[in-house]
Image (cartoon, rainbow, N blue to C red):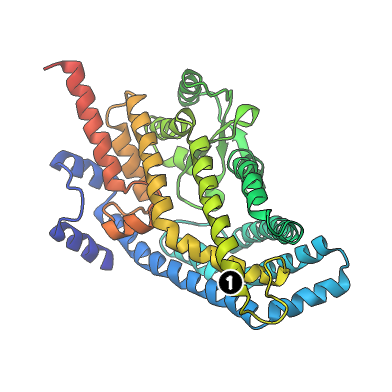
């Protein structure tokens, strides 16, 4: 198998964490080598697919702008809708709708075909297309409002718009990270309180020790879409929520679930929501500055009727520019994210006394989610927003050994 060949190559080259024999046996028992090979196979498909889709998006958006099609659509919206904001919103809505429909084959292959081929999902096509349609509705409506608001801001405040956009971005980012997901997730899944049990009591006790005011642990039907597992702690204040996917409750042992939830609580206790929002805002300031400096230069050479940033017909070029920036900046943003995730791993290890539960939890999530156990360093550098699985397991092992030595003494 291709995946097994990749694993052998990594082992031979020495580009992977080497577990001690006892840890290797435990990991291989939970995450069998044959399944590890499947993880390499799906990664070998998914990583090139990312760049193929990105290239298609860039070509499509630049063509839509350069051909003058966006200008013609903007003129049609202006003729039918006299109010500039709503005309721009209509153009953005139609552009996003057409863009999403053009990308539907890629979304179907990556989001439906591949997960089913590798056993990561049993969801019916009707469930998948229903969720895709809900996501499309949210994207087009919210995107239309943001796009229209942007072009009207530029039109009204030609010189000051970067400063205003930077100020407005801060509360929008915080709202999007902290509050909005709490209201969005119920559109896709059903949430119900987890019945009283030793696990739910342990989770709530740990939450109370760490200043999380949640009084209920929620279970949600993640199995509706996927066989993968996940849990999260989201929201702030009265919007705080601890939620665990039913797939994780099904496949992981209680102490393993508790370890994963401790990781999620670590994000809360270490204020990662605020730090993540700050990093995102600083990144948005850099993006706004680049847009203000570079886009007007490019627009001067654009098609007739789309030579100003305040023209709604320039939005496709703006979208292409943002996609290009995300491709270029991925290693930086992912490196920051890996640092944050490692800090949460440290918190989980230091605030639980569960023996080898961390090792077992990571191995179980690996086999559940088909995460590459020993991914290539280059793939980690570009794609990974979490530390690679072998490093997370090795850290859990080292911490467990240190804790044991401290208890037994020299």
Depicted 97 relative to depicted 350: above or below:
below
Left or right of 51? Residue 235 is: right
What residue is shown at x 54% (from left), y 77% (from top)?
A: 59
What residue occupies the far front of the structure in this picture? 159
Quarter in which the C terminus is drawn: top left
Determine whether 328 is above or below 17 in the image.
below
The image quarter in which residue 180 lies: top right
**Left or right of 256, for residue 186:** right
Question: Which residue position is annotated with label 1?
Answer: 297
Where is residue 264 shown, x and y percent of the image?
Answer: 45, 34
Question: Which sits in the foreground, 26 or 388?
Answer: 388
In the image: residue 5, left or right of residue 334? left
Numbered circles on residues, count: 1
Query: Which one is nearer the viewer's eye here, 173 or 3?
Result: 173
147 to the left or right of 115: right
Who is closer to the viewer here, 64 or 358? 64
- Seen from this angle, which residue lies furthest left? 410
The residue shown at (63%, 76%) is 300
* Residue 25 picture quarter: top left
What quarter of the picture does the N terminus occupy? Answer: bottom left
Res 112 visible: no
């Amino acid at each position: 198998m291709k995946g097994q060949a990749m694993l052998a190559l990594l082992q031979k080259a020495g580009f992977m964490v080497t577990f001690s024999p006892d840890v290797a046996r435990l990991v291989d028992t939970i995450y069998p080598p044959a399944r590890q090979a499947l993880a390499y196979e799906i990664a070998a498909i998914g990583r090139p697919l990312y760049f193929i889709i990105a290239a298609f998006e860039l070509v499509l958006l630049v063509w839509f702008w350069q051909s003058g099609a966006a200008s013609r659509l903007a003129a049609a919206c202006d003729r039918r809708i006299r109010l500039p904001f709503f005309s721009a919103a209509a153009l953005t809505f139609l552009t996003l709708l057409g863009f999403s429909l053009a990308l539907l084959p890629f979304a179907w292959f990556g989001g439906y075909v591949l997960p089913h081929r590798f056993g990561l999902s049993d969801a019916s096509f009707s469930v998948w297309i229903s969720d895709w349609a809900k996501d499309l509705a949210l994207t087009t409506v919210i995107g239309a409002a943001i796009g229209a608001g942007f072009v009207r801001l530029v039109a009204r405040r030609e010189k000051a718009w970067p400063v205003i956009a930077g100020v407005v971005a801060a509360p929008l980012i915080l709202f999007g990270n902290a509050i909005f997901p709490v209201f969005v997730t119920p559109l896709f899944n059903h949430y119900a309180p987890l019945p009283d049990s030793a696990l739910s009591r342990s989770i709530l006790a740990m939450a109370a020790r760490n200043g999380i005011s949640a009084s209920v642990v929620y279970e949600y039907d993640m199995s509706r879409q996927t066989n993968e597992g996940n849990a999260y702690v989201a929201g702030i204040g009265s919007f705080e929520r601890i939620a665990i996917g039913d797939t994780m409750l099904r496949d992981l042992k209680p102490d393993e679930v508790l370890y994963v939830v401790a990781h999620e609580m670590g994000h809360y206790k270490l204020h990662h929501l605020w730090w993540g929002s700050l990093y995102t805002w600083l990144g948005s300031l850099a993006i706004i500055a680049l847009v203000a400096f570079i886009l007007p230069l490019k627009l001067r050479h654009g098609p007739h009727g789309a030579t100003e940033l305040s023209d709604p017909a320039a939005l496709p070029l703006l979208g292409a520019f943002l996609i290009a920036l995300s491709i270029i900046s991925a290693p930086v943003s992912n490196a920051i994210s890996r640092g944050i995730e490692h800090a949460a791993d440290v918190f989980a290890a230091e605030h639980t006394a569960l023996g080898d539960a961390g090792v077992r939890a990571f191995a179980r999530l690996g086999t559940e989610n088909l995460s590459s156990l020993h991914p290539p360093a280059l793939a980690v550098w570009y794609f990974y927003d979490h530390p690679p699985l072998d490093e997370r397991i090795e850290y859990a092992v080292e911490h467990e050994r240190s804790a044991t030595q401290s208890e037994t003494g020299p």
